[in-house]
Amino acid sequence: MTNFKKIKKPLLYAGLGLALLSQEAYAQKSSAIADQLQLTWKVKDGQNIRKNPVSTLILKNKGKSAVQLNDWSLWFNFIRSIDPDKVDKRFAIDHRNGDLFQVSFKKNNFLLNAQDTVHIDFITTGLVNYTDGPIGLYLKNNKTGLATNISDYSAVKIAPQSEAEKTDYFAYKYDQNKLVEGAVAQHIIPLPSNISINNNEKFNLSTDTKLFVDHEFASEGGFLTDFLTSYSGVKLAASSSPQGGIEIVKANNLKPGSYHLTIGAKGIRIEASDKAGAFYAIQSLKSLVNHSQWNKATKSITLPYANIEDSPRYGYRGFMLDAARNFHSKAEVLRILDLMASYKLNKFHFHFIDDEGWRLEIPALPELTAIGANRSANFEDGKAIQSAYGSGSTAKPHQFYSVADYIEILKYAQARHIDVIPEVETPGHARAAIKAMRARFAHYSKLGDKQKAEEFLLDDAEDKSVYNSAQNWNDNVMNPALPSTYHFLSKVIDEIKAMHDQAGVPLTIIDLGGDETPSGVWEKSPKVLAFMKENNIANVLDVWPLYITKINTLVQEKGLTMSGWEEMGMRNKGKGMVVNADLGKSGIHLNVWNNLPGQGQEDLAYRLANAGYKVVYTSAANNYLDMSWDRDFADPGHSWVGTVNLNRTYSFSPENFFINLRKDDTGKDLRPEAYTNKEQLTAEGKKNLLGIKGALWAEKVSTDQRLEEMIFPRLIAIADRAWAPEQTWEKGNSFDEATYRKSYTSFIKKLGEDELRKLDRINGGYTYRLPKIGIKKEGSQLLINTDYPGFKVYYSDNGSTPTLKSKIVNGPIPFQTGKKYLFKVFDAKGRSGDVISY
């Protein structure tokens, strides 16, 4: 085990800290040109945003003196491609690597006079929303190399759109929202296995109520008393024996995670066989308490008589957070864990390592965070990695989890019955690690220590292979022929395992990524060619399954289970990736995401489970929470999966994916090949389906506010699908739309009218996504509704921005031609959505 207290970082990396401080000092002073420039990005008028539109960067000199642009270059991150041959000859736009672009000013004596503007037009691949635009803009002096962020920058959130197109969109939204009206709200989220409620009789929970907790469930009882103390005026009195009131007792006949909850004349009784079951019963009790009783003025909580017998549908109910592309603090991780626990999610897949950042301190390899957690405009010196996903010019301090941070997260999760599954990406998505170990190599090479220099090296300097990864990197894949690659992975796993041991939370499973290794890798590496000869491999494609076998053995020898993305269970025999049945019984767990409707892999999760792999169904088409909610240009998120709204998330049928697969995300009919003649889940395959998971990739998620907006409320729908028993509409070969609508409407009514109000209170409030507005004109009236109920819409008919003092929508609104109507959604705390004009 590593002794964390005795490890000290090499002096080289102390120097890096001084370099970063000097950069920050420069950035604080700022350059005069950065202060003078105002930048705006927009899509030019008359463009079809889906078909290679022309967009423009507008540079305005808002200062009092001219700016000599030739002295500078403009840098930004941009996830789309740019055609360099179709840029105004006064400029050059060059792709550097990843998502980083450089604009050079080519015109001789390029002066931008005071108050003048210049437009940089460029053609991109299709856009979906404003978050596709450039981010992280900074200027770099061509002579000094010093760089500074552009602070005055905005992306226009309104796309070129005709009034007819806008009207059609709002009418479409109204019709979709109308489908979820009616029905009675379900009583608890997630939906229990069996529940009966008697609203005619009530039990009053008050300060006079006694609480008895079996000693084995003492910590779970603490969560109940903490809840009541924090969110009500009820303080329970402890009892040494069960005598009515609240009883949390041990029962030996229930499955793990299961519970019985009864509420009657004598009070509340919770029975469970394990701590997790008792904990989940308390979460159900919290959900049963209406939000109106969640306040300090409440001295008595009224609960209906109830009888609940509940067990989870799946043992794996997860969420993956990407904290590598954009870092999110320990405090935010703890906030996310709290809500995961509230909705009975029990697996936290922690993705803190990727091309764009290494976010976990590894004491034995301090370079990983000294280099890999710092993104800077001055990356060429090897003391940082390049800017990515809006990080800007200057490295931010402490963009990683320390050993102490990680241990605190582990303990916090364990107390809430959540397992943390760390992910170490290999062989692809490894650029931050590769650059860090290359810096280590350079350092020890200068000292003449060849052994230390090469000890953890991850790339072959003589490798001339040409490739381009999914995120446009050409240098992000570890070399499987280097013994140092395996030594590196072994060391990192040992260090992570030591942190778990120190936390008292033993590591049992570790994720080693394995996704998106691009074609072309290793083909021109002398080390790999020698490796192939040594292992009697004739085709470079066969290096892949051998590598997966080797790292699986490495992990198993440490007493651990290896998980990874679906590619670990696949191989390429020359015609694309197919299921590798040879490793089906190897013990590898797979996160399977690829089921995109109409793309041919709709049944991949089933094929892998049927082949023997343990599968966690991480459906991109339903559960990728970084996706845009719908086709509104002002709605943030990715779009390569299509759109993923709450309805699409809730409609996921893990064991019968094709049941409601008939249309794509635009509403167009899919070809029957998308849902017919597909491999179904066998009885054996069903045993291998461990559960389901939601995922949030953070390329477009740089703030905690955006993170929570993207996750919630969709993650709550995932929690319901992971816990609740299989529904009637999921079964058979034909989809019962009416039964589904009743189920979904019941869920969404509980969510909008009750659960989201609780999110306003928990931990000071969460910035979940506010519902969007639908508008439909019928005759001389405007009809208004929202994505989900429970929120007020304010409006004006004189062009003024709606406030809490404006008129509230309480029914149809009289419409008069010539008037400008503006609408805005507000939540109970006064937080508001975008202004919608009609």
Image (cartoon, helix red, strand yellow):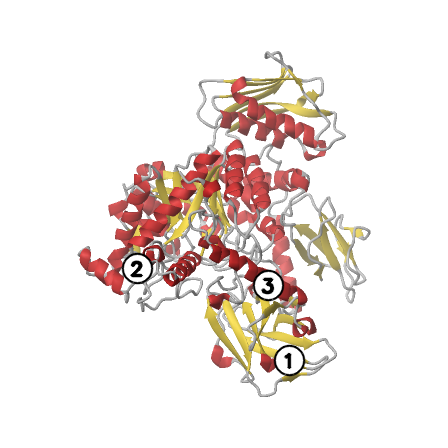
Mark 2, mark 1: which one is toward the viewer? 1
Circle 3 sits on which residue?
22
Instruction: Give the secondary structure at mark 2.
Output: loop
Mark 1 or 3, which is nearer the eye? Answer: 3
- Work out how far the residue at label 2 is from the one at label 1, CA to CA, in angstroms: 46 Å
Q: Quadrant of residue 507?
A: top left
Which residue is drawn at the image coordinates 76% and 52% (left, top)? Answer: 794
Residue at x 56% of width, y 52% of height: 398
- Residue marked by disc 2: 576
Near mark 1 (Cα within 10 A), the count class, few <14, some 14-19 or many ≥20, is: some
Mark toward the start of the polypeptide (1 vs 3): 3
Residue 447: give x, y in percent of width and height: 38, 60
Residue that appears at 24% across and 57% down:
542
Q: Nearer the viewer, mark 3 or mark 2?
A: 3
User: Which amino acid, by three-letter code, is at mark 1?
Assistant: Val
Residue 677 in sight here: no
Which residue is labeled 1 in the image?
118
Question: How far across and down, in percent of the image, does residue 629 sit?
Answer: 57, 54
How packed mark 3 is, by other alpha carbons closer than 10 Å (few <14, some 14-19, many 20 or more), is few
Give the position of the C terminus as an image quadrant.
bottom right
- Quadrant of the rendered image containing residue 27: bottom right
Q: What residue type is disc 3 on?
A: Ser
* Amino acid type of the residue that numbered disc 2 sits on in the rendered structure: Gly
Q: Position of residue 310 (x, y in %)?
A: 50, 27
